[in-house]
Amino acid sequence: MAKKLLFTTILNSDKWSIKPLLNSKQLKKIHTEVSVKEIQIPVKWGHVAAKLWGDENEQPILALHGWQDNAGTWDPLAPILCKKRPILAIDFPGHGLSSWIPHGMQYYPWDLPRLILYLKDYFKWKKVSLLCHSMGSIAGMRFASVFPDDVDFYIAFDSLIYDDYDLNQIVENFPKILRKIQVTQSLTGEPPCYTTEEIIKIWHLGTSKSVTMESVPHLMKRGTKASTVDPNKYYFSRDPRLKHILFNVEDKKFVEALVRRLKCPTLYLKGIDSPYASDEHSVEMRDIIAKNNPDFECHFLAGTHHVHLNNVELVAPLILNFLQKHKFLK
């Protein structure tokens, strides 16, 4: 049913279509060596780690990754884009090289748009430029809707809102999730360790093969650590509390009120092999955005939920064209 809805949308819309894209040879011509800098942004509980590609004296595009991923998700794309605009890719709290939140606390999805606000104030940006994937896209949408005058553009991969699920099933799952949260709060010691080959396979299968085996190493750089027990093995270094975030489904009227406020130029790119954002509610919300925002642009591409990571040659031209069209390139 989900794919039927998705492809009905593609077929019935002139605006939402697959565009001609660069081939790998063309892509290599615009892919140049650029400076990459690791930075740490202070927060109350420690720091937010980030990678900065390009000129550190120019305001960057803020890049936000998906759930249990990290800033490495932008490694293939950032070197291409930063030739035109610097890219600042953060690790969300508990992810990558960023500090974990205090013991006894739990991660809350609405803290992410609040973090965007914090970064805007910290760097004294007049407006935020957003490049987002999955959970990061949902955070970006929320920020751009709550603060519509504080975002100059918003680029989102595969998600805009949380998918619509069976509410009764969600309520039935809450006891299990809350108990798992209790368990993760008391975990100590080193997590299970694996060889590099095992880590790659586990990460690949853990994303339902969305992250290709070839792409996993980009995430491993910031998402794994060498074992202190067995130097030939590694463990997943993200906060285990992230596994059991309560992604609460929100009232549809509330979500609609949010998306109606999105007014900045917006580029939405969706992998057609992804199961996400294909439900009737997600399609309806995209229709509302398209009707209310004349600067909303949408493309469906061959690829998975991680199309930005696996298929950079497909997405880079569309992003550059979008930024050029709205005069956001230097």
Image: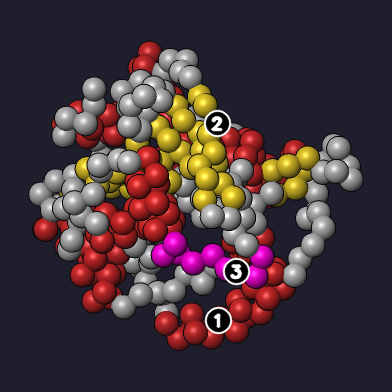
Q: Is residue 31 something that shows in the picture?
A: yes
Name the quadrant containing residue 215.
Answer: top right
Q: Residue at position x 51%, y 72% from top?
A: 246
**Going by the image, does 194 lie left or right of 33?**
right
N-term-proximal mark, 1 vs 3: 3
Q: Is residue 302 something that shows in the picture?
A: no
Quadrant containing the C terminus is: top left
Q: Position of residue 159 (x, y in %)?
A: 36, 55
Q: Nearer the viewer, mark 1 or mark 3?
A: 3
> How packed is label 1: few (under 14 Cα within 10 Å), some, or many (20 or more)?
few
- Report if the CB atoms under discs 2 and 3 are less than 8 Å apart: no
| Main secondary structure of the magenta stretch | loop
Q: CA distance from mark 2 to mark 3?
A: 27 Å
Quadrant containing the N terminus is: bottom left
Local SS, label 1: helix
Q: Which residue is mark 1?
A: 174
Q: Position of residue 284 (x, y in %)?
A: 22, 66
Does the magenta-highlighted stretch encompass residue 200? no
N-term-proximal mark, 2 vs 3: 2
Indicate which disc residue 38 carries.
2
Q: Amino acid at mark 3?
A: Met
Q: Please state the extent of the stretch shown in magenta in the rendering.
A: 103-111
Q: Position of residue 305 (x, y in %)?
A: 44, 49
> How packed is label 2: few (under 14 Cα within 10 Å), some, or many (20 or more)?
few
**Going by the image, does 179 lie left or right of 4?**
right
